[in-house]
């Protein structure tokens, strides 16, 4: 453990298990202000943490998980007497549950934590409870074409191949037929997924009918962030998504706090059914629902705040959901702002690299986007010289634009202006 100061007996502390897909160090630190002191747990040998490693190393109260067992991690954490524990990383849910059990702290039970991390386990549990969802198959990463053809028998195509554990659309592939599945597995030959891949039926159309004056498509996907207390849901936000960049990378999302359309109310009911099916008593969930002609279908239940949601809720004047998760970990009943939110919607718009791009050569025009009405921030995520790869999924975007709009039509105007003003040159 790094840092010399011992625990402050007068201050409540939350242990935060972080990894490469966690919220940024500074965002978590800010969310903890006035709520709790933080004890960080991270594998500091993991180069995927990037600059977060140096920030963590200077944080003071850090347990380095590199090369140690869960039992050893619990032994290192125990003297700091944490009052709660949490993680914002799907794949670290089971590890965090084990730590919580060892230290008698609140967290998801082990079986639920496993289902929140593992797409196969989760879909199996939802199917057993009668919750409608896509058909799916477990595909070993080393499966040969003959194995694949046998394993996918009876599964409708087109389908989506994705890691069994993962988030953000990383290494997620569109498969038109069985041959495309085998080709995708060969493409991943140098990065075998422990436990295999999941191939699931692709529901909806990925892009539904036109919206606004420009004809831009709105995805069939709805993401619902909900706070669960005593098995009852309090929905904090509904996020809709613009049309996807190939194959399944998000180009933009917008959040509203109340279901202003019958489809969203139906999605909320589907979320509540999934919560009951999984036996969630307490937690913050981000649930992806596909709207189909046959009704809503649960795609995925995540045991943490959705990507980009804290920033969008903040722009609408709502409390920080990262703070809410900390309060939950401490046994509290957080306020998620049940009163009227700021009018309109909050959004994030993303410039994704084309599939053939390998690196960024230059970026221009971002300053013109910042001047647009309602834009709060325009941030460069990939700079000149940085590598890009569609396999990185949605988090591999080049430019992100964040702001508020009075209507969907105004948001789509900003999207068109972003496409007009920002020019990115790539090397293929």
Image (spheres, rainbow, N blue to C red):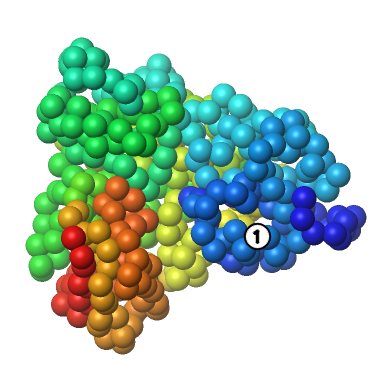
Position of residue 152 in the picture relative to residue 342 (left or right): left
Q: In this view of the protein, which residue sits in the foreground, 145 or 284?
A: 145
Instruction: Assess disc 1: are there few (<14), some (14-19) or many (≥20) residues with their C-alpha within 10 Å of its C-alpha.
Output: many
In the picture, residue 286 is in which quadrant? top left
- Residue sticking out furthest to the right: 9
The residue positioned 49% from the left and 52% from the top of the image is 48
The residue positioned 37% from the left and 32% from the top of the image is 192
Position of residue 316 in the picture relative to residue 322 (left or right): left
Q: In this view of the protein, which residue sits in the foreground, 315 or 200?
A: 200
The quadrant of the rendering that contains the C terminus is bottom left
- Residue sticking out furthest to the front: 190
In the picture, residue 400 is in which quadrant? bottom left
Q: In this view of the protein, which residue sits in the foreground, 246 or 402?
A: 246
84, above or below 405, in the image: above
Residue at the spot of label 1:
56
Tell me where residue 106 appears, x and y as whole percent: 70, 37
* Labels in figure, total: 1
Tell me where residue 419 appears, x and y as whole percent: 18, 72
Tell me where residue 354 appears, x and y as whole percent: 19, 58
422, above or below 229, in the image: below
The residue positioned 62% from the left and 63% from the top of the image is 54
**Which element carries disc 1, helix, strand or loop?**
helix
The residue positioned 77% from the left and 50% from the top of the image is 1
Q: Is residue 107 visible?
A: no
Q: Is residue 93 visible?
A: yes
In the picture, residue 253 is in which quadrant? bottom left
Q: In this view of the protein, which residue sits in the foreground, 175 or 48?
A: 48
Tell me where residue 137 appears, x and y as whole percent: 29, 21
């Amino acid at each position: 453990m790094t840092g010399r100061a011992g625990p402050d007996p007068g201050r409540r502390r939350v242990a935060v298990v972080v990894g490469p897909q966690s919220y940024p160090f500074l965002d978590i630190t800010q969310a903890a202000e006035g709520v709790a002191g933080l004890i960080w747990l991270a594998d500091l040998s993991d180069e995927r943490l990037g600059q977060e490693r140096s920030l963590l190393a200077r944080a003071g109260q850090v347990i380095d998980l590199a090369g140690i067992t869960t039992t050893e991690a619990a032994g290192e954490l125990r003297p700091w007497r944490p009052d709660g524990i949490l993680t914002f990383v799907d794949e670290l849910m089971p590890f965090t549950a084990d730590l919580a059990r060892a230290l008698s702290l609140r967290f998801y039970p082990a079986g639920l934590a496993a289902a929140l991390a593992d797409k196969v386990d989760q879909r199996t549990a939802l199917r057993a409870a009668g919750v409608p969802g896509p058909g799916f198959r477990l595909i070993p990463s080393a499966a040969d074409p003959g194995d694949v053809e046998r394993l996918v028998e009876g599964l409708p195509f087109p389908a989506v191949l994705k890691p069994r554990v993962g988030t953000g659309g990383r290494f997620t592939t569109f498969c038109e037929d069985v041959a495309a599945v085998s080709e995708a597995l060969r493409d991943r030959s140098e990065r075998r997924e422990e436990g295999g891949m999941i191939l699931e039926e692709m529901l909806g159309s990925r892009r539904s009918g036109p919206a606004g004056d420009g004809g831009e498509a709105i995805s069939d996907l709805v993401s619902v962030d909900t706070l669960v207390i005593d098995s009852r849901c309090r929905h904090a936000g509904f996020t809709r998504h613009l049309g996807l960049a190939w194959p399944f990378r998000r180009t933009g999302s917008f959040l509203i706090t109340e279901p202003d359309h019958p489809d969203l109310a139906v999605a909320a009911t589907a979320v509540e059914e999934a919560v009951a099916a999984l036996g969630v008593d307490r937690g913050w969930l981000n649930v992806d629902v596909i709207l189909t002609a046959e009704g809503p279908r649960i795609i995925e239940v995540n045991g943490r705040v959705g990507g980009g949601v804290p920033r969008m809720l903040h722009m609408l004047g709502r409390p920080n959901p990262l703070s809410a998760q900390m309060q939950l970990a401490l046994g509290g009943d957080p306020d998620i702002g049940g009163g009227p939110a700021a009018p309109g919607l909050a959004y994030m718009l993303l410039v994704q690299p084309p599939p053939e791009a390998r690196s960024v050569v230059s970026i221009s025009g971002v300053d013109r986007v910042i001047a647009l009405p309602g834009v709060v921030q325009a941030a460069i995520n990939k700079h000149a010289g940085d590598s890009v790869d569609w396999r990185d999924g949605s988090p591999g975007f080049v430019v992100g634009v964040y702001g508020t709009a009075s209507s969907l039509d105004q948001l789509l105007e900003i999207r068109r202006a972003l496409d007009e003003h920002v020019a990115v040159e790539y090397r293929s």
